[in-house]
């Protein structure tokens, strides 16, 4: 993501207007990865499935924000 945020605007000779979506996508993905890792680590407990599901949703939202941000550049 960091590489894409750095290279894509330069490739299209444009800039990313707002920095908030960049930060949001980073934190959504980080939180999603932490939740998925936690859920997969506790696979024998009943808490594993909700953590994995929440992590997947946060990862998906983070990737949507990432794609939307780069789509504005293109």
Image: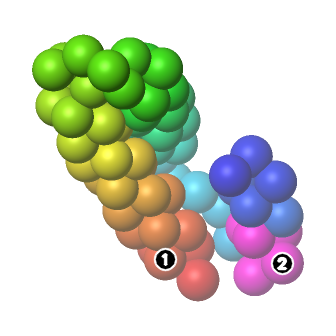
Residue placed under numbered mark 1 in the picture: 71
Instruction: Give me the C-alpha separation between circle 2 and circle 1.
Output: 13 Å
Which disc is residue 42 wearing?
Answer: none
> Tell me, what colour scheme is on the image?
rainbow
Q: Residue at 16% x, 31% y: name it.
A: 50
Which residues are drawn in magenta?
A: 8-13
The 10 Å Cα crowd at callout 1, few under 14, some 14 to 19, many 20 or more, is few
**Depth order, front residue of 20/45:** 45
Q: Is residue 24 above or below residue 6?
A: above
Which image quadrant is residue 44 in? top left
Mark earlier in primary sequence (2, 1): 2
**Does the image show residue 8?**
yes
The secondary structure type at the circle numbered 2 is helix
Answer left or right for 59 relative to 15. Answer: left
- Find out whether residue 48 is within the magenta segment: no
Is disc 2 surrounded by few (<14), some (14 to 19) or many (20+) residues within 10 Å? Answer: few
Q: Quadrant of the C terminus?
A: bottom right
Can residue 65 be seen in this snapshot?
no
* Location of residue 20 by image quarter: top left
The correct choice, above or below, for 3 with respect to 8 in the image is above
Residue in the picture at 84% in, 78% down = 11
| Image point (40%, 67%), residue name | 68
Residue 9 drawn at (x, y percent): 73, 67
Q: Which residue is mark 2?
A: 11
Q: Is 43 displayed left or right of 3 in the figure?
A: left
Residue 13, position as x, y percentages in the image:
78, 76
Which SS type dominates the magenta stretch? helix
Image coordinates of residue 18 in percent, x first then y, are 47, 46
Look at 82% across and 54% down and name the residue there. 3
Element assignment for label 1: helix
């Amino acid at each position: 993501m960091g590489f894409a945020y750095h290279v894509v605007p330069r490739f299209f000779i444009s800039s990313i207007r707002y920095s908030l979506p960049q930060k949001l996508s980073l934190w959504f993905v980080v939180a999603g990865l932490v939740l998925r890792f936690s859920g997969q680590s506790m696979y024998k407990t009943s808490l594993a499935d909700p953590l994995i599901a929440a992590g997947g949703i946060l990862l998906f939202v983070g990737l949507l924000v990432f794609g939307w941000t780069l789509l504005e550049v293109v």
